[in-house]
């Protein structure tokens, strides 16, 4: 009928390039940008269908390849909740992205629409909000997404411009909750809740020193420049905004700093001891670092996602303790992945928190964090957030009325409510995470060095190995043991045994064509050597 004709017609514009096999992966589709137009067009169609399936709720479509190189790009979908696309739809995403002809595409869509009982064109269309990061290929790909969205009859595509990934997720979530959902609403929400937390700081501890931010030459630094204009009690110097000739993610950004543990471009000996932070290319990751005075060369002292998680956990636990017995009944839990530094896990366990492990990729962590009243999740690379259950939040709001204004308990409850507003509960967000770290440090009266002393990281090393076929590596569900190739796990175990506190695992990347190797040991030399010998086994 007309719907089929519409898709047949538009798909002629976007033939699939030969010899690419795409998979939705850890965080959507990613590839060299020149290969992605047909994929993004098809994800546009999928997004319209997703919206229709969920009573025309707004769905988000983000064009970004995050920390990957500037010539790459990618596309991922935000569900109406603001979370990642339901994993149940990923196989369909894979199928249509790889459909080799318009006919095959149409037939896959037809079957899926029937199976999911999606009704097209009768009760209004779908609505999809399209965002992109600063990559030069973004605009062209966004046009392809628009055509895909609109090829589902009655569906509308709204271009919401250049945004960070978490901004788009936040806006989609707010829109579907019936709240104000523009980018300025996003900023206003951050500013208000940050100020609220600042006002609740016990006066004598206040300390403000300059934070130096590495914007990864991407969208995050630029948005931070806007946000900074509305904030008092925060002094940020922003470098690597992308306007001074630097290249996105090249020698800069959270992924680079975390994996290489060296200073990003634009930082050096003049910054010794300063509190520094890095965003990744789409600003959903945040790490802190400082250059130690005894630093030789370009080494940094890294405060990764695990340290951020520990700081958040400590602060929240402190507020619950102030509330007393009732506060202690709150189920506060932590979700980490196999990449979490062993020392961080020990630290939060000693605090009395429950720790659970999930597979790599925030979609997996997010799911587990929802099981708690307050669930904090972080990947070591700096991607994470805090989730507050609806029932716990309404309990808090009730208590705010019960306790007398200005009392310790009232302040503690108000802080928790403000944290729930400040932190982006849709998805990990470098901007909101940064504001929360900053206000907690001010609250504690801590320097970055003091914060770093919460626990000492076990030395670790990550390397990636390029292989002809990364899918040859298959792991258990926790990703800590390799089932294939046969025999490799025994060989890895034999290497691990040679080291004190040795731990190592391999897994295929879901975003790059590599196998990742992680190793921990009691000294840096040992961690390096363990990582390298395991990498040799993979080659
Ligand atoms: P892969 O490439 O699957 O390891 C990487 C990160 C994930 C996640 C995604 C999405 C590591 C080891 N892996 O996934 O944690 O952030 O990218 O960006 O950092
Ligand atoms: Zn990212």
Image (cartoon, helix red, strand yellow):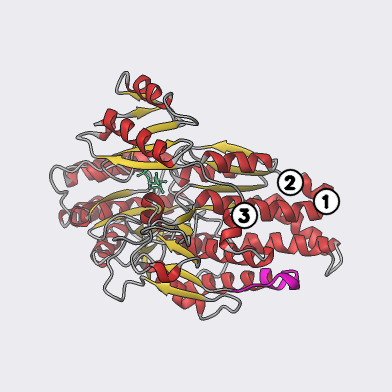
Q: Looking at this view, name the residue that lies furthest to the left.
A: 18
Secondary structure of residue under mark 1 = loop
Tell me if I can see residue 364 in this picture: yes
Left-right relation of 333 to 405: left
| Earlier sequence position, callout 1 versus callout 3 | 3
Disc 1 residue crowd, few under 14, some 14–19, many 20+, Cα 10 Å:
few
Q: Position of residue 388 (x, y in %)?
A: 64, 52
Residue where numbered disc 1 is placed: 324
Disc 2 residue crowd, few under 14, some 14–19, many 20+, Cα 10 Å:
some
Position above or below: 102 against 508 = below
Task: Provide the residue span drawn in magenta.
Answer: 197-208
439 or 388: nearer the viewer: 439
Q: How many marks are shown on the rendered structure?
A: 3
Q: Quadrant of the C terminus?
A: top left
Q: Position of residue 156 (x, y in %)?
A: 37, 64
Tell me if I can see residue 160 in this picture: no
Q: Position of residue 204 (x, y in %)?
A: 75, 72
Q: Position of residue 165 (x, y in %)?
A: 42, 60
The residue at label 3 has a CB less than 8 Å from ligand 1:
no
Residue where numbered disc 3 is placed: 312
Residue at 70% x, 43% y: name it. 331
Residue at 75% x, 57% y: name it. 396
Q: Which mark is nearer the camera, 3 or 2?
A: 3
In the drawing, what numbered circle is on residue 131? none
């Amino acid at each position: 009928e007309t719907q089929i004709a519409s898709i047949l017609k538009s798909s002629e514009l976007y033939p699939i390039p030969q010899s690419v096999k795409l998979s939705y992966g850890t965080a959507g589709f990613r590839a060299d940008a020149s290969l992605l137009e047909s994929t993004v067009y098809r994800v546009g169609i999928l997004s319209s269908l997703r919206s229709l399936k969920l009573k025309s709720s707004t769905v988000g479509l983000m064009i970004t390849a995050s920390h990957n190189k500037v010539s790459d790009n990618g596309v991922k979908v935000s569900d109406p909740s603001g979370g990642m696309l339901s994993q149940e739809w990923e196989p369909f995403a894979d199928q249509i992205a790889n459909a080799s002809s318009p006919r095959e595409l149409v037939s896959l869509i037809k079957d899926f629409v029937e199976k999911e009982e999606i009704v097209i064109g009768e009760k209004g269309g779908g609505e999809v909000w399209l965002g992109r990061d600063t990559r030069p290929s973004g605009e062209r790909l966004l046009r392809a997404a628009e055509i895909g969205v609109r090829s589902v009859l009655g569906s509308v595509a709204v271009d919401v411009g250049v945004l960070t990934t978490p901004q788009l997720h936040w806006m989609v979530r707010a829109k579907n909750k019936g709240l104000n959902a523009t980018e300025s609403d996003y900023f206003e929400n951050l500013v208000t809740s940050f100020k609220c937390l600042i006002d609740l700081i016990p006066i004598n501890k206040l300390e403000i020193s300059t934070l130096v931010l590495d914007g990864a030459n991407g969208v995050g630094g630029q948005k931070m420049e806007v946000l900074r204009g509305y904030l008092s009690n925060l002094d940020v110097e922003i470098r690597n905004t992308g306007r001074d000739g630097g290249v996105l993610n090249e020698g800069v950004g959270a992924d680079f700093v975390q994996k290489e543990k060296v200073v990003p471009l634009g930082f050096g000996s003049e910054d010794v001891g300063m509190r520094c932070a890095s965003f990744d290319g789409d600003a959903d990751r945040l790490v802190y670092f400082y250059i130690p005075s005894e630093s030789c060369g370009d080494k940094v002292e890294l405060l990764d996602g695990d340290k951020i998680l520990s700081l958040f956990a400590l602060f929240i636990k402190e507020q619950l303790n102030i509330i007393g017995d009732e506060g202690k009944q709150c189920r506060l839990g932590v979700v980490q992945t196999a990449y979490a530094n062993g020392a961080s896990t020990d630290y939060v366990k000693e605090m009395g928190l429950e720790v659970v492990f999930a597979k790599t990729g925030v979609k997996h962590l997010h799911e587990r964090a929802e099981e708690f009243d307050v669930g904090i999740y972080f990947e070591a690379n700096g991607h994470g957030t805090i989730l507050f259950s609806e029932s716990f939040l309404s309990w808090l709001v009730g208590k705010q009325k019960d306790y007398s204004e200005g009392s310790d308990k009232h302040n503690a409850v108000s802080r928790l409510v403000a944290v729930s507003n400040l932190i982006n509960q849709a998805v990990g967000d470098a901007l909101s995470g940064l504001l929360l770290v900053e206000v907690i440090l001010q609250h504690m009266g801590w320097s970055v060095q003091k914060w770093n002393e919460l626990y000492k990281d076990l030395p670790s090393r990550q390397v990636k190995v390029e292989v002809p076929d990364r899918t040859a590596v298959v792991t258990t569900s926790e990703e800590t043991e390799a089932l294939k190739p046969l025999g490799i796990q025994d060989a890895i175990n034999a290497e691990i045994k040679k080291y004190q506190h040795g731990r190592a695992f391999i897994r295929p990347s879901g975003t790059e064509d590599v196998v990742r190797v992680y190793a921990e040991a009691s000294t840096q030399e040992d961690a390096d050597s363990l990582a390298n010998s395991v990498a040799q086994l993979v080659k």
